[in-house]
């Protein structure tokens, strides 16, 4: 059974930093591209970033480019999102999602971890 | 980059059929596959349609997807509506720069 378990969400002040983690199990992690998707409270889904199976390619939404860094450790079956220079508009539930065969289709999602940026 | 535009809300009665549209602002809707996700309150999204019109195993055949190049849009059709279909539905695609794009979401009310 595929499982994606996010962690690391907390309350942080504007300008602060945070690292989210996603622990994956139930599939061969290093075969798949992985994504982060977020959802602000009461709002829609927003794609944040993706990383290729080997970490060699990364892409970001314009809203986070230059502030967030996606990475992975295939030896630990883990995905990460380093978030710097946080803004109040980054407040959201952050989901880790598995890509299906590099088709930019999210076939499995975690339960999300909540990041709140507030003073 | 492009946007995907969905109606904010739709409503229909149980047993009826509803169609949710997703219009691409620029570039051809056929250029990149469209997916549809269902999100019930308090839950993570799940896929109901992928690659324009494919249904994952376990999704009932009451759910179907299509694209229409003339209107540059994708559509999700749910027939034989059930109260359990009440949820938010999101279309999703991606651009040529490998960035994901979601529609704003449509709240389906089954009343």
Image (cartoon, coloured by chain):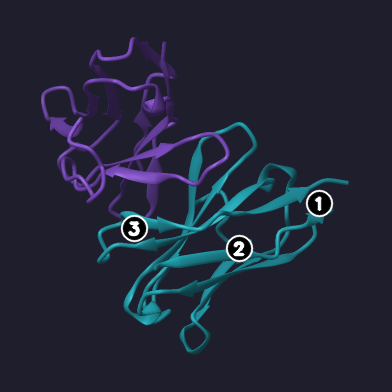
The quadrant holding residue B8 is top left
Residue bearing mark 2: A68
**Nearer to us in this view, A114 or B25:** A114
User: With respect to residue B9, does A50 lie above or below?
Assistant: below
Say whether residue B82 is left or right of residue B64.
right
Residues at marks 1 and 3 on the same chain:
no
Within 10 Å of disc 1 (Cα), the crowding (few <14, some 14-19, many 20+) is: some
| Residue at x-position 56% and y-position 65% | A5
Residue bearing mark 3: B98
User: With respect to residue B93, does B41 lie above or below?
Assistant: above
The quadrant holding residue B27 is top left
**Nearer to us in this view, A54 or A112:** A112
Colour chain B is painted in: purple
**Nearer to us in this view, B108 or A99:** B108
Q: Secondary structure at mark 1?
A: loop
Number of the label disc, if any, that sits on residue A14: 1
Say whether residue B82 is left or right of residue B16.
right
């Amino acid at each position: 059974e595929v499982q994606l378990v996010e962690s690391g969400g907390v309350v942080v002040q504007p300008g602060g930093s945070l690292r989210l983690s996603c622990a994956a199990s139930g599939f061969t992690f290093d075969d798949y591209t992985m994504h982060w998707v977020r959802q602000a409270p009461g709002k829609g889904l927003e794609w944040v970033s993706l990383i290729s199976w080997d970490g060699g390619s990364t892409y970001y939404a314009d809203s986070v480019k230059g502030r967030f860094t996606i990475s992975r450790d295939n030896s630990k079956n883990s995905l990460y999102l380093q978030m710097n220079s946080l803004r109040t508009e980054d407040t959201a539930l952050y989901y880790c999602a598995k890509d299906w065969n590099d088709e930019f289709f999210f076939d499995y999602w975690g339960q999300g971890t909540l990041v709140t940026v507030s003073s | 980059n492009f946007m995907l535009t969905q109606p904010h809300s739709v409503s229909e009665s149980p047993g009826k059929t509803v169609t949710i549209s997703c219009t691409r602002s620029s570039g051809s809707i056929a250029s990149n596959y469209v997916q549809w996700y269902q999100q019930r309150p308090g839950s993570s999204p799940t896929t109901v349609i992928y690659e324009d019109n494919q249904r994952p195993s376990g999704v009932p055949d009451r759910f179907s997807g299509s694209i229409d190049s003339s209107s540059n849009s994708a559509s999700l059709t749910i027939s034989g509506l059930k109260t359990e279909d009440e949820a938010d539905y999101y279309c999703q695609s991606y651009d040529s720069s490998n960035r994901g794009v979601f529609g704003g979401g449509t709240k389906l009310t089954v009343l």
